[in-house]
Image: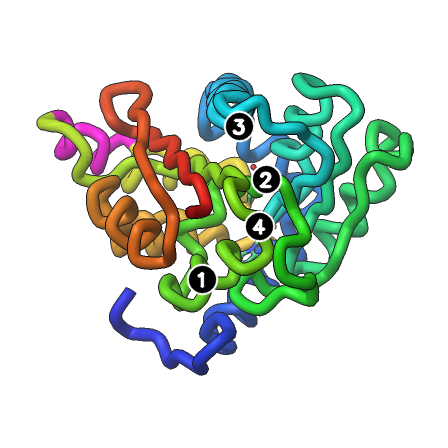
Amino acid sequence: MSNVTLTMGSSDPKYVNLVKSDFSVLSESYDLINNFMSMGTDRQFRYLAIKNLISNHSENNNQFTTFIDIGTGTGHLGNELGGQLPGSFVVGLDVTKSMIEFAKNRDIYKNGLFNFVLGDAAKTPFRDSSFDGGMSGFVGRHFTNYPSTLSEHHRILRKNGRIMMLEMGRRATKFAFLIDVYVGMFMSLLGKLAAFLITKGNAPFRLLEETYARFYSPEELKSLYQGAGFITRYKLGLLGSIVIMLGKKK
Ligand SMILES: C[S@@+](CC[C@H](N)C(=O)[O-])C[C@H]1O[C@@H](n2cnc3c(N)ncnc32)[C@H](O)[C@@H]1O
């Protein structure tokens, strides 16, 4: 993450504008494109990631009430949590208004257990210790100011609260070169093709390739989480193409 301008306490404004402009045109087609380019595996990974978050959280007989879904997009990760842990309350935070608007209007989110807030993952409007748990799915590649962003997530979680990040795995196993071809080229190409066909050429779909190329390895991510005050471990899936980072606030 070298060529970005950092303002202490928030994400790089230029990159955030890029995120907003790309995801604004994608909101209605995001799920379809995601499903197509991942060949349906994205659902499976969200299911596994939430299962891990819940079992990590249950270790100390932690009670569940309130969770934050950081970069919620169309809300799938939070919705998966609601399904696996009925009665939990999820706040979905996202910097792109139309993603939230789209998520809000879907019938499944009208049960009162899901709320949405427009905002930046590196500088949220929440009070200290607001949440019992936090999660993010395929958003970590978009964080431009890691120390500030993870410190912010640490701040809004209560003591012993659990955090989970689901992301693409980079340089994670000896199969890394295959994953680079699979994610960096093949998936990215599928995404571009799907975006072109579905949005009739309106969505550039440029961010997957760019963010994947500069993303951290699981070991580097682990150090960043530790630096922000989390006790951290991770799991890898599909030959290391997927990482599930699990943290506990000390
Ligand atoms: C690839 S989508 C992932 C959506 C969802 N979590 C999922 O599992 O499908 C990335 C989302 O993160 C949001 N995002 C990117 N950077 C962000 C930031 N700094 N703060 C909040 N949301 C952000 C984007 O607007 C977009 O909706």
Mark 3 lies on a secondary structure that is helix
Q: Earlier in the sequence, mark 2 or mark 3?
A: 3
User: Which quadrant of the view contains residue 63?
Assistant: top right
Q: Is mark 1 within 8 Å of ligand 1?
A: no
Q: Tell me the residue that label 2 is attached to.
A: 133
| Residue found at the far left of this picture | 174
Q: Earlier in the sequence, mark 3 or mark 4?
A: 3
164 and 62: which is toward the camera: 62
The stretch drawn in magenta includes residue 176: yes
244 and 168: which is toward the camera: 244
Q: Earlier in the sequence, mark 3 or mark 1?
A: 3
- Whether residues under marks 3 and 1 lie with C-beta atoms below 8 angstroms apart, the answer is no
Q: Tell me the residue that label 1 is attached to.
A: 151
- Whether residues under marks 3 and 4 lie with C-beta atoms below 8 angstroms apart, the answer is no
Q: Tell me the residue that label 4 is attached to.
A: 157
Q: Position of residue 32 (x, y in %)?
A: 62, 31
Q: Earlier in the sequence, mark 4 or mark 2?
A: 2
Q: Hey, what amino acid is under mark 2?
A: Gly
Q: Is residue 189 left or right of residue 134?
A: left
- How far apart, in angstroms, are the residues tagged by discs 1 and 2? 15 Å
Magenta region: 175-182
Mark 4 lies on a secondary structure that is strand
Q: Residue at x 66, y 17 (%)?
A: 84
- How far apart, in angstroms, are the residues tagged by discs 4 and 2? 6 Å
Mark 2 lies on a secondary structure that is strand
Q: Tell me the residue that label 3 is attached to.
A: 57
15 and 81: which is toward the camera: 81
